[in-house]
Image (tube, rainbow, N blue to C red):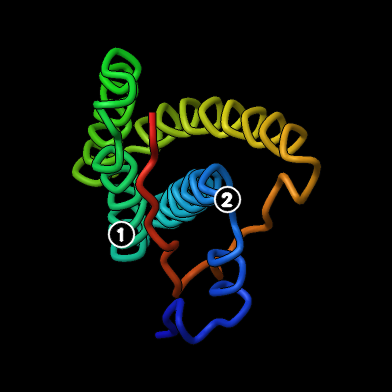
Amino acid sequence: MSTAVDNPYLRDAVMTATPEQLQLMLYDGAIRFALQARDAIEKKDYETSYLRLTRAQHIILEMQNGLNYEVNRPLCERMAAIYNFLYRKLIDANINRNVQDIDDALKVLHVERETWQILVDKVSKMRGGGQSDPQPTTNETDEQPVGFSAQC
């Protein structure tokens, strides 16, 4: 299994990304792993679905643990509720092998990702340009996205 350190593209992408882009990368990773888990459940490959859902859960936990309540407590509380919902749906999908739970989580993940993309675009314009939509930074099976602590 490859690690993030072994992939120079990934290392460079993470090291040069803004905090907003790093958060976007986390959403991309959670979405990618959830989709892979969904496909695995449909193929009755429960080991792969477990592994992919677990990775998506870890990403959600990383985002939740990175909330900074000192910056904006009400916003962080709302984000924590969203992350709790996502985490619970991914756990339910893992336990029940239910694609509907994954679909429910994916709907929210896509909306949150779109919101972050808008934020990245606006911040990028304010800073005077730059790449606003980072390409996925992990391969589909082996590498886990690098964690990032989100600031509310």
Q: Amino acid at mark 2?
A: Thr
Q: Amino acid at mark 1?
A: Tyr
Residue, disc 2: 18
88 left or right, relative to 22: left
Residue, disc 1: 46
Q: Residues within 10 Å of mark 2 (few under 14, many from 20)?
A: some
Position of residue 33 relative to residue 127, above or below, is: below
Q: Residue furthest front?
A: 127
Query: Which of the two residues, 92 or 82, is positioned nearer the viewer here?
Result: 82
Task: Say which element carries label 1.
Answer: helix
> Residue 65's x, y, as percent?
24, 42
Position of residue 31 relative to residue 4, above or below, is: above
Q: Residue furthest left?
A: 95
Residue pictured at 39% horizontal, 52% vertical: 148
Q: Residues within 10 Å of mark 1 (few under 14, many from 20)?
A: some
Residue pictured at 45% horizontal, 32% vertical: 103
> Looking at the image, is mark 1 or mark 2 nearer the viewer?
2
> Residue 100's x, y, as percent?
39, 30
Residue pictured at 50% horizontal, 27% vertical: 107
Image quarter of the N terminus: bottom left
Q: CA distance from mark 1 to mark 2?
A: 36 Å
Residue 2, picture quadrant: bottom left
Residue pictured at 46% horizontal, 76% vertical: 4
